[in-house]
Amino acid sequence: GRQEPKVRDLILAGGDTSGYEGVSEAITRRCDADSGRRAAEAREYGRELQDAIAKNKVARDNSRRAKIVSRELEEAAAGAREVHDVASVLRDKEEELREWQRRHVGRVNEDRVALLRKAIAN
């Protein structure tokens, strides 16, 4: 304020300070209002900071959860690939078995036909 330095200078110079009685009260009131405003700003800043910290914690928790889920998905995908591979091997074995059965049954039938022909011939 403009009056502050003048009053201070007068006091330091040992001058007449009559008529300035209300000044110190005005300065005190202004300082109180100022500190009140600053305290309110500090509280608001504190709340914003707490909010930011809480949001950061949530974000970190979510990130941690996302990593866990991602890992679980990778494991599930690996498991699915394994099942697919096993199923593929089983299909191949089934095909081999069917092929073997066709050849074997064919041979058995040829043997029966040959036996029947012999029987008929005799």
Image (tube, grey):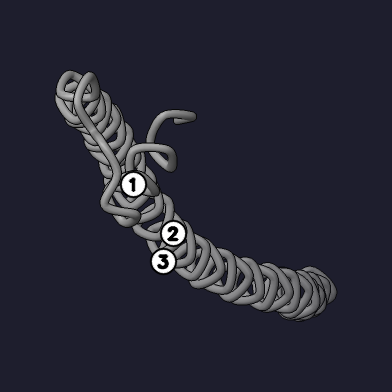
User: Dot 2: few (<14), some (14–19), or many (≥20) neighbours within 10 Å?
Assistant: few
User: Dot 3: few (<14), some (14–19), or many (≥20) neighbours within 10 Å?
Assistant: few
What residue is drawn where x is 84% and y is 74%? 121
Can the viewer see residue 109? no
Element at label 1: helix
What residue is drawn where x is 40% and y is 64%? 64
Residue 101 shown left or right of residue 13 in the figure: right
- Residue 3 position in % (x across, y down): 41, 29
Residue 96 shown left or right of residue 27 in the figure: right
**In the depicted view, which residue is nearer to us: 110 or 71?**
71
Find out whether the residues at labels 2 and 3 contact each other: C-beta distance under 8 Å. Answer: yes
Find out whether the residues at labels 1 and 2 contact each other: C-beta distance under 8 Å. Answer: no
Residue 11 shown left or right of residue 68 in the figure: left
CA gap, disc 1 and disc 2: 69 Å
Q: Quadrant of the N terminus?
A: top left
User: Can you say whether 45 is above or below 30 in the image?
Assistant: below
Instruction: Report the residue marked by disc 2.
Output: 69
Given this view, does label 1 or label 2 mark the residue nearer the observer? 1
Element at label 2: helix
Element at label 3: helix
- Residue 38 position in % (x across, y down): 30, 36
Instruction: Report the residue marked by disc 1.
Output: 8
Number of callouts: 3
CA gap, disc 3 and disc 1: 67 Å
> Which residue type does callout 2 highlight?
Val
Instruction: Report the residue marked by disc 3.
Output: 68
Q: In the picture, residue 120 is in which quadrant?
A: bottom right
Q: Quadrant of the C terminus?
A: bottom right
